[in-house]
Image (tube, rainbow, N blue to C red):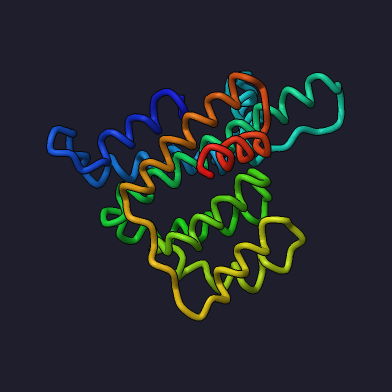
Amino acid sequence: MLLNLLIPFVLTVGSGSKDSPHLEQPEIFLLLQTVINILLPPRIISTSRTKNFMLDASPAHCSTPGDTGKDLHREGLAESTSQAAYLALKVVLVCYERSLGNQWYRLSLQVKEMALQKVGGLAFWDFIDFIVGTRIPVFVLLRPFIQCKLLTQPADSRHHIADQLERRFIPRPPCKSSLFAEFNNELKILKEAVHSGSGWPACRANQASRTS
């Protein structure tokens, strides 16, 4: 749904083209909340098999020790879902930056919750790197948390993030057209990675090789 429907839809509608339909603010909020609910599913008290499957497949709910095959399948499903969801979140935030209003504060709290729950692994750190690099509005709200909490945790991705934060002169954020090109490229690579069964590191490696 994310790779074949939601992300392409937002990239098309949110491009600002005169031919694209215009979304009202409640519809934009719904898009944002849909993506957030994938990363941080609302707590559901039910015995429904469908709801239990959605909880098990979500990035915020890791698999428990048990059958090895089922655990590997569940972990792969959660990893692919988190990669796609973080990409969808970046797309929505860039396309509708001026329409989110007070949602930025709420988003900052949700990102902190994602960090506490360790949602998405490497995909989460890639998202934090994106926030720091693009300086979207939520960056101002999250900067103290990133510096005081996140960067104290051991992770390979934190060195690049720390370097960006320590720069004396703030680099100019990339323009929307370059971000859109990056999103489309990342979407293409992620689709290939999902279909081939490769994980996030392979996806990142392919992206780096193509953009170099």
Rendering coords of residue 159 (x, y %):
67, 64
32 displayed left or right of 199: left
The residue depicted at 55 percent of the width and 57 percent of the height is 129
Observer-nearest of 40 and 190: 190
Furthest residue to the bottom?
168
Is residue 200 shown above or below 122? above
Is residue 96 shown above or below 58? below
Rendering coords of residue 157 (x, y %):
67, 56
Rendering coords of residue 16 (x, y %):
21, 43
Furthest residue to the front?
212
Q: Quadrant of residue 134 in the image?
A: bottom left
Observer-nearest of 43 and 202: 202
210 displayed left or right of 30: right
The residue depicted at 65 percent of the width and 37 percent of the height is 200
Observer-nearest of 127 and 113: 127
Is residue 33 shown above or below 6? below
Observer-nearest of 203 and 116: 203
The residue depicted at 40 percent of the width and 33 percent of the height is 7
Furthest residue to the left?
18
Count of labels in the image = 0
92 displayed left or right of 156: left
Is residue 180 shown above or below 48? below
The residue depicted at 64 percent of the width and 39 percent of the height is 205
Rendering coords of residue 164 (x, y %):
55, 68
